[in-house]
Image (cartoon, coloured by chain):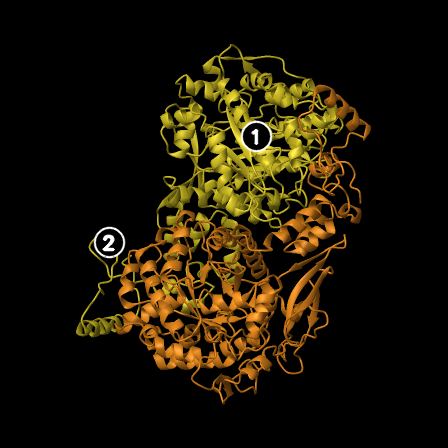
Chain colours: A orange, B yellow
Amino acid sequence: MTSHDTSLSAVGTAAQTVTSGPISPAHHRGYVAGSREDLRVPVRTVHLTNGETVRLYDTSGPYTDPAFEVDVRRGLPALREAWIDERGDTERYDGRIADLTPAGLAVPGAGVRPRRAAGSEAVTQLGYARRGLITPEMEFVAVREGLTPEMVRDEIAAGRAVLPANINHPEIEPMAIGKNFLVKVNANIGNSAVTSSIEEETDKLVWAIRWGADTVMDLSTGKDIHTTREWIVRNSPVPIGTVPLYQALEKVNGKPEELTWELYRDTVIEQCEQGVDYMTVHAGVLLRYVPLTARRKTGIVSRGGSIMAAWCLAHHQENFLYTRFAELTEILRAYDVTYSLGDGLRPGSIADANDAAQFAELETLGELGRISRSMDVQVMIEGPGHVPMHKIKENVDLQQRICDEAPFYTLGPLTTDVAPGYDHITSAIGAAMIGMWGTAMLCYVTPKEHLGLPDRDDVKAGVIAYRIAAHAADLAKGHPGAQAWDDALSDARFEFRWQDQFDLAMDPDTARAYHDATLPAEPAKTAHFCSMCGPKFCSMRISHDIRAEHGDGVAVVAVEAEAEAGMRAKSAEFAAAGNRVYLPLAD
Amino acid sequence: MTSHDTSLSAVGTAAQTVTSGPISPAHHRGYVAGSREDLRVPVRTVHLTNGETVRLYDTSGPYTDPAFEVDVRRGLPALREAWIDERGDTERYDGRIADLTPAGLAVPGAGVRPRRAAGSEAVTQLGYARRGLITPEMEFVAVREGLTPEMVRDEIAAGRAVLPANINHPEIEPMAIGKNFLVKVNANIGNSAVTSSIEEETDKLVWAIRWGADTVMDLSTGKDIHTTREWIVRNSPVPIGTVPLYQALEKVNGKPEELTWELYRDTVIEQCEQGVDYMTVHAGVLLRYVPLTARRKTGIVSRGGSIMAAWCLAHHQENFLYTRFAELTEILRAYDVTYSLGDGLRPGSIADANDAAQFAELETLGELGRISRSMDVQVMIEGPGHVPMHKIKENVDLQQRICDEAPFYTLGPLTTDVAPGYDHITSAIGAAMIGMWGTAMLCYVTPKEHLGLPDRDDVKAGVIAYRIAAHAADLAKGHPGAQAWDDALSDARFEFRWQDQFDLAMDPDTARAYHDATLPAEPAKTAHFCSMCGPKFCSMRISHDIRAEHGDGVAVVAVEAEAEAGMRAKSAEFAAAGNRVYLPLAD
């Protein structure tokens, strides 16, 4: 791992360093050509020691490309700029004025005038899909996932998938979220009033996608929310999500009752202009649902949910996000921002799972999803939370039925409450299962959940745990191509190609370090045994060839049901060959 | 955590230290009285700051009891000695002579003559259960799990549960393994030729049970196997399992073809005399099944399986563990050693899951299980391995049908091959699911799986991941009492009782450390917000009382469907109360 130091000493107050370069020397970030020259789809190619290559989906952006010069002050190249321009349906205008440099930092996007829809037709991927267009974004996704562009368009048109891509975030490498695509992983980052800085958050973004985050949510709640977000959006090749309510609440000094629709609306527009790709909106927390939480063990645990519940009770009026939903949808439509309809009443404990409050809100989210799609605005639905294993499937089944198969985006769920410090594991269990049953994106949980704000190590631990869950779900769903990765690693394992095992591992650094901790010597990496059992006991060595070379290249033993005499002959033959279970491989 | 130094300087070559004392000051190891004075069932009582107590199942042995003086040179007290004596069906005799001190270490059990059955009746818990006896061991289990002694006896008599308790291991605190009991976790330890020592392994035993291992398998393959095992058995309050084949192979210098029944038999008797409670026996690896593995991606990955396959091929004879199975069963019967019928042909990769080789062997394990039970010898069946999520349930369903509901004991399964370094997570996913569907015991996998031998940290990581899986399964199965733990922790969470959250956590040390990393100040532990969101944004704070005190003590909001006027009145009322979503709690 190399570190690319892009010090800000000339323009700012702090050094800005993000991790760049390939994870492993055998990893090569390549690009697959699409139908046009500016459509280059990233792929991670792993070069194995036996001459084979394995292609893996790559979320890391150009940061892992040694040919790319990282400059976080400048931000990433605007890959989609030409595509958006060509469509000719947007206009530039003077956006909201925000004080971009409260922290004394230069801001990458300063001076760029935002775009919005110019005419009455939707500039959303859903709108294009319904009008029969295959956008470059859709083709990008098709190449990336090994699907046809038509299939991508159909899934988006049907509302079964979303392609979050704000027209003001031209830097992204398009991706799709839907049950007929690879299961995706979201990582949350964001500073809070208590801890962390803009520099740390930008680094966490790059770090999170390095390990496989497909989208990143900036949940900053502290000072400099706007500036932090600007740094993140301009440097992000993955869609960025936010909860605009957090920033709105900052503007009223944390007093929910002082929130107004107008203030919220302006905050949303500010974020639309900045390039946020999807927004969590807690429009399903209705006044009449709040009492349903009163007998709960852990009440309302969603921040957004509790803020809106507070507002509803303070005013004894219906949630303005619900009453103004059509108006809000008009705004998102003008920028192609995707809804992530928040489950503000999700359960926060095993005891509260699948209760009346949760499912009442789900019905409302279904209703709002239909409104959103009727206006050509893309929408996904958020889900729990804390759910014991036997109640997980009901969550997906209900959501799919009530919400017309809109992509489900769940937080975990955690399958027990009793392991704080290990909630990446308690929830990876639930995430893998809910993914298998049709959830499209899994919001990660880090080991610090319930305890503190995640640091770099926690972000990595969370992303890896969730990549495991997502890939396990892809295997269980039989996603075409998913198992090729497992097969390649298992082949390397059986053939004692240690370097290839490390390079094919989800986290090569850790796999290599753990191996070296027991057997640090270089020859051990090619030894025909592993450190667990020692040379004499290695099952793979002992079992290495029950195989006699066969015509079709596959080694097969011709034992079957032989007569007593044949058995003795075989015994002699085996002894003559040196008493080795598997003959030496031909190569 | 305190460390009790029991230096061996006077008698041996190395310092011997094991971790002792309560995990947390709020944890108290207590004992629940049974029907007789010497039947004291351990329980971990957690004292909460609100005066309540929570009782947790405790596997840690007397090591966490401050009143117990640890002396690993002496070993643990022989709790069951009187119970075994009273039954009057065993005799002491001169056992096998083994060189117990090759490492220059004193051995705790030296000089004790082993027991064996004296008459023709089985001295096994299965035998007693079938004869209608409720042994003190069964009552111990009943008290421990909150079940009736009759139910425990019935489950054992039916072969649906085992109570591994060698008459030469009187130190154990009895426990049961069966689908109608709490899901259990096994931790593997053991030195190898490459690394680790006797001292390390004894420490790992105590460390593994401290974090919740219900049984421990000693898989030592290096030098001093006998002595290492003696230390482990004498200091273990949990059943100890082994794979006798490993030691037998050491005796023939690692050459499978030189193994003989006689040599194997003597090794088994040596281990029976020492007190091993259950033994993995790879009797299902039949000669005719070996070719079924030839086209596999990863061949045979079980060490025992590959050793027996090598023997079968070398001699072109049937596996002697199969042909001599009745004779072997007679031996285990004389000591009440439980079979763990090994799945020597388990899949070692996603590609090989649920294949012909695996299920052919399972049929044979079913047949062997019936022979075993017909001789009153307890038996459980081992299972995979590497299995994608959608193929997991078939494993349990087939095993339960083919093996007459004998307890299933699985390794993971790992749900993907691509994350070496994180296989405690890839497999905790599979373990939780297979546990939910009826697997009785989960063999842990550590982060070092496939890479190296686990150290102390790895043992803890593996045990915790598997305790999570087991508890998640208990919740999903609706085990009576399982959810009380989650409820207690969630109550503490909602009421901002941070100390109680730590004390109720599966790993209080880590939960506390993670919290302190973000908010180290002591007042933060009582603060009504947490470090993730900061004071303004905490959903639990904001949402803390939608509750108005109600007659039955449960807080309920009377919002419902009110008229416009009523809404305004409520609004004023809310403002007058300080605009707080939840009123202050009465206490």
- Depth order, front residue of A113/A128: A128
Residue at point 64%, 53% (across, down): A485
User: Percent x, y for residue B183?
Assistant: 46, 38
In this picture, is B227 found above or below A478? Answer: above
Camera sees residue B8: no
Which residue lies under the disc numbered 2?
Answer: B553
Q: Amino acid at mark 2?
A: Gly
Camera sees residue B507: yes
Disc nearer the start of the sequence (1/2) = 1
The numbered dot on residue B240 is 1
In this picture, is A195 found above or below A449? Answer: below
User: Percent x, y for residue A353?
Assistant: 37, 53
Farthest residue to the front: give it.
Answer: A551
**Callout 1: few (<14), some (14-19), or many (20+) C-alpha neighbours within 10 Å?**
many
In this rendering, would A64 be left or right of B516?
right
Q: Amino acid at mark 1?
A: Ile
In this rendering, would B25 be left or right of A44?
left
**Callout 2: few (<14), some (14-19), or many (20+) C-alpha neighbours within 10 Å?**
few
